[in-house]
Image (cartoon, grey):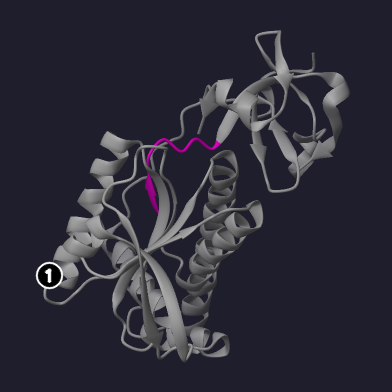
Amino acid sequence: MPYKAAKISFDGSHYIATPKENFPQGRRRRKARPLPDAELDKKEQFETAYTESKKLPRKERKPFLLDALKDTIPDKAQREEFISQHTERKKINAIRRKSRLSKKVHLQEWNYFCTFTYDDKKHTEETFRKSLRNTLKHLVNRKGWKHIGVWERSPEKQRLHFHGIFYIPQGGMVGEMIETKDYSTKVRRMQTARQNTHFLERYGRNDFQPLGSQEEVQQSLRYLMKYIEKSGEKLVYGGDLPTYFISDVLDEDILCPYGVDDRKAILADDFTCCIEGELIGKVSREIIVQMPKAN
């Protein structure tokens, strides 16, 4: 048995094994030293300017950053090097978040794509954000909900709303589902929304779109990934959302090495799951539920 207790993830096409012996965890990461005040100020100014630059066309972003930091870093060559270094850092972090998101999404079951907004008569933007976050937290703890979502603003009015993919277990729904129809000025036609009365009464308009197929889940995943690319902001996670499940890996189930320095492996689509040498069964959603999990 070549790998024991490997971390297994699914990328949407293949199962990937990450052997723990190829990624030893014995050494603790060194804590990053606090930055001097001058360097911390540069980084904070970059973060603010970088966020603003995302609203601009791609070709205008670097000139905007160069202008925003010209007083802090007067030397142009040093300023360009600083911006290049930290822009690359932001790109790498976004790639890592997308990879983590994909692994978490493909390891879970999802049944709704939800949108929540607020009525001005019920909330301000600040109270809406705080209250909805608290409501979702309670539903995770009391009803077993899971979600991955984003706070987002509408392009024209910049109105805050929340999008996310949700898993709501059987018997875990609150309120009642009702269908409402109204005219959308955005798409210029009548639209039907499946609204939940619990959220309608507390916040305002909402929409619970059932996810009936894997393709619909993939569409939702692409939406969340597009958001990461567009804004670079972090996603909101709720519930028990492991990134990997743990399994021993049999030699005959390894198709080929994978990744940097071939330290990972692509597995057969029907590989056998094992725990401490005990055969559990061919990989499936039912079998994965029985396997140990990890992040």
- The vertical placement of 32 against 73, above or below, is above
Give the residue at mark 1.
Answer: 122
Q: Residue furthest left?
A: 121
For the residue marked with disc 1, what is the amino acid? Answer: Lys
Percent across and percent down for residue 5 are: 64, 19
- The vertical placement of 243 against 294, above or below, is below
**For the residue carrying disc 1, how many other residues have a C-alpha within 10 Å: few (<14), some (14-19), or many (20+)?**
few
Q: Is residue 8 magenta?
A: no
Please provide the residue range marked out in magenta.
Answer: 234-243
Residue toward you, 101 or 176? 176
Q: Is residue 234 visible?
A: no
Is 215 on the left-hand or right-hand side of 183?
right
| Residue located 31% across and 82% down the image | 158
- The vertical placement of 64 against 108, above or below, is below
Assign the magenta stretch its main secondary structure.
loop
Q: Is residue 245 visible?
A: yes
Percent across and percent down for residue 38 are: 29, 66
Q: Is residue 241 magenta?
A: yes
Q: State which quadrant residue 233 falls in.
A: bottom left
| Residue located 46% across and 54% down the image | 112
Residue toward you, 228 or 240? 240
Q: How many marks?
A: 1
